[in-house]
Image (tube, rainbow, N blue to C red):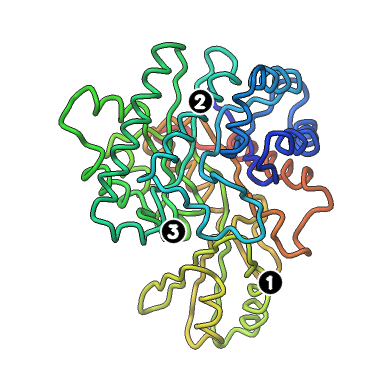
Amino acid sequence: MIRVGYCTNVHAGADLRTMREQLERHSLLVRDQVTDDGPMGIGLWISARAADELREPHALDDLADWLGRERLLPFTLNGFPYGDFHQAVVKHRVYEPTWAEPQRADYTLRLAECLDRILPPGEPGSISTLPLAWRDATADPEFGRACGRQLTRVAEGLDRLAQSTGREIVLGLEPEPGCVFDTAAGYGDFVAKHLSPTDTATRERLRRHVGVCHDICHSAVMRESQHEAFRTYRELGLRIAKIQVSSAIRLRVHPEHPDSLAAIEQLRTFAEDRYLHQTTVATASGVRFYDDLPEALAERGAPTESEEWRIHFHVPIHHDRLGWISSTNDEIRECLTALADLALSVDHFEVETYAWNVLPQAHRWERLADGIAAEMRWFLNELTRRPASGT
């Protein structure tokens, strides 16, 4: 069954009490605008601190009961941010701890226990996580092997959970620009080197429980076609745990276009301090990668040739344009077309515009819930228009 929800990492809440308050304040308002009677899906973000607090007696049962009463269905968890995702400066901290460290596997297994307890019986779950680390981690020659060991440990834990409770949970590693792997092909390289054991039972556990979380914005920034990405996943035999429905900034400039300087000036208003905004700039001579938007803006200045910028800034998916700037939300439609063309079945879709609170003020909604609800309605409408498989 297809599940659609929005990711609650857009809300501050690094402890259990605040997480619950944020859901009450925002998610219930979104629900009332999206569904009349049935449950509304959410991609629940549970930080490591909140996951520890959920060890308290009855805490998980209380959360499950409340979610059920309020018609919120947490079919997926976002296990990428470990700590406080809304501190003043996050940037590279979001990649800590890495998958070479036991703390990352411990946290992920704890999330799986939480998900098993808060989901209704028979409902499969998914968890998204980081693509191992920021790329600098590969300087350690043991890094890949260490990640492989920790992921194998998680696959074994998820397999034990499935056998004891019947709950099917898939972990999805999420390619992201600038990380150890940022494309489907890069993920394939890691699988070939470190997630392809000769032991048949271990290999089957990994294939069953460790797959991919495909973020549409990330593919767009890396200029990877949606068809190419999903074709690669299929060839690798990777399960698609979920798709994060997201849209990047796109900006086309040309030295002779009168609006180019105004567009670049508007782009500067998106260069905020909390999150990393990886940027690619394409010209006739190739594509240049920048770790963060301020770095790209400082280097390039006024355009001397035709350029197309793509920025890892999750902008509202239902907007084609934000002033002079456009978005890559056409890639969302391309993603749905690719799934149909390749006859791929994906059940979990998570709208993940976590950057609402750092958008320039002119592009925020008065009530955050109204903006999120508009995104949800837009995507649900796109789903109803998706082409049939094989067309």
Q: Is residue 235 left or right of residue 71?
A: left
| Residue 269 badge | 1
Q: Which residue is mark 3?
A: 177
Q: Is residue 374 left or right of residue 199?
A: right
Marks 2,3: beta carbons within 8 A:
no
Residue at image position (53%, 46%) is: 333
Q: In the displayed orientation, state which residue is furthest to the front.
A: 56
SS of the residue under disc 3: loop
Distance of mark 1 from mark 2, alpha carbons?
A: 38 Å
Q: Which amino acid type corresponds to the residue marked 2 in the rendered image?
A: Gly
SS of the residue under disc 2: strand
For residue 132, above or below residue 320: above
For residue 201, above or below residue 172: above
Q: Which residue is mark 2?
A: 125
Residue at image position (55%, 70%) is: 293
Pinpoint residue 100: horizontal percent, then vertical percent: 35, 45
Q: Which amino acid type corresponds to the residue marked 3 in the rendered image?
A: Pro
Marks 1,2: beta carbons within 8 A:
no
- Snapshot quadrant of residue 64: top right
Q: In the displayed orientation, state which residue is furthest to the right.
A: 366
Residue at image position (35%, 55%) is: 180
Please report whichever mark, 1 or 2, sits nearer to the chain's N-terminal start.
2
